[in-house]
Amino acid sequence: MSAESTPRDSEKHVVVLDDDIIVLRATARLLRAAGMRVTPTTSAKEAMEHVVCDSADAIVSDLHMPELGGHLVLAMLARAAPSAARVLMTSETDFARVAELLVPYSVDALIAKPDAAVKLVPMLRDLLSSTRGTSTTRGDNARAHARTIVRALALREYETESHCERVAAWSKRLAQELELSPTKILEVELGALLHDAGMLGVREAIIQKPGPLSPDERFELRRHPDLGAALLTEIPVLAGALAIVQNHHERVDGSGYPRGLLREDIPLGARIFAVADAYDAIVSDRPYRRGQPDASARQEIASVAGVQFDRQVVDAFLRIDVVDWLLVGQRAVGQATDRPPAPDHIDA
Ligand SMILES: [Fe+2]
């Protein structure tokens, strides 16, 4: 069955799917009170039709349903309507077990039913204001510029788009956890996305060299943070990302480059990026080793808090729920078109 909608043209349209009519009505009431246009339904088929045919902005689906599990509904919609945000709501308390059911990249966020009253509206607002929409806000404009640069990097086969998207999304999540202002959070996201923009100014022969670099070649490579910063001064909408790009190889113990800055002398955004980047490096497959599991990455990063990484950033990282963190990473790579990365000496 399908209950009535409350159309308000300028508002976001959310389809809610749940076979429990009491939960369905309560969820619909909650979202309407937040100013959203809601189409509640108990039918998976109707829900999919509304999302695909009416171009709904989001769907919130129950997991356990008699006809078709919510995780399968969302997996189908990930293909049929990829721009709609997809939230899976569940009464299961073990999120790790639920996460095992999910088709990769099919769910943007998980929420426990008891948390919905407090968390669902902010979660949807965050998803609907992220990169998937077509709005022309300042953030979207800046992201569009940044992604053009990231694609240029990917064409040189230095960096993969998915790596840049993942570290940007995780850096943004860390900035949110640290309760930075919306402007700062956007700067952190853009800076992380563009961290290696300066590699565009490094010779192809160095980027693609399979063996160890000579001292001169290493010197040239290590100019890329400054080259990136210089590039961004030419693009005013990306100026906020400059500090992260210029300092993304600094380390809190002073052993980084190009300036060997210490602790708080390194901009906070760059200290945030360092943790997100290290996490991605540990869990990603390399030609000579398999990626490590999430738990190993957490342990390794925690072990060098205060030495290699900023302690308050590591604390924020460890506070974030593991499933939340993994979904942020999955969502980020949903639309990247990857090519193989350059030889591994580049990060040295
Ligand atoms: Fe770099």
Image (spheres, helix red, strand yellow):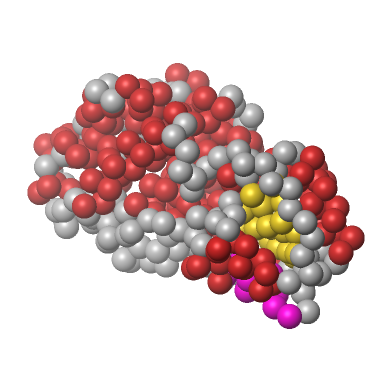
> Percent position (x, y) of residue 146?
34, 37
Quarter of the image for the C terminus: give it.
top left
> Percent position (x, y) of residue 72?
63, 74
**Height in image: 122 above or below 67?**
above
Give the left or right position of residue 249, taking residue 252 as reference: left
Quarter of the image for the N terminus: give it.
bottom right
337 or 56: nearer the viewer: 56
Question: Residue at 33% across / 59% down in the picture?
Answer: 337
Question: Residue at 27% across / 57% down in the picture?
Answer: 341
Q: Quadrant of residue 24?
A: bottom right
* Magenta span main SS: helix
**Height in image: 93 above or below 263?**
below
> Percent position (x, y) of residue 136?
44, 34
301 or 162: nearer the viewer: 162
- Residue range in magenta is 67-75
64 or 170: nearer the viewer: 64
Based on the picture, tell me whether residue 245 belongs to the magenta stretch: no
Question: Residue at 32% across / 36% down in the picture?
Answer: 145
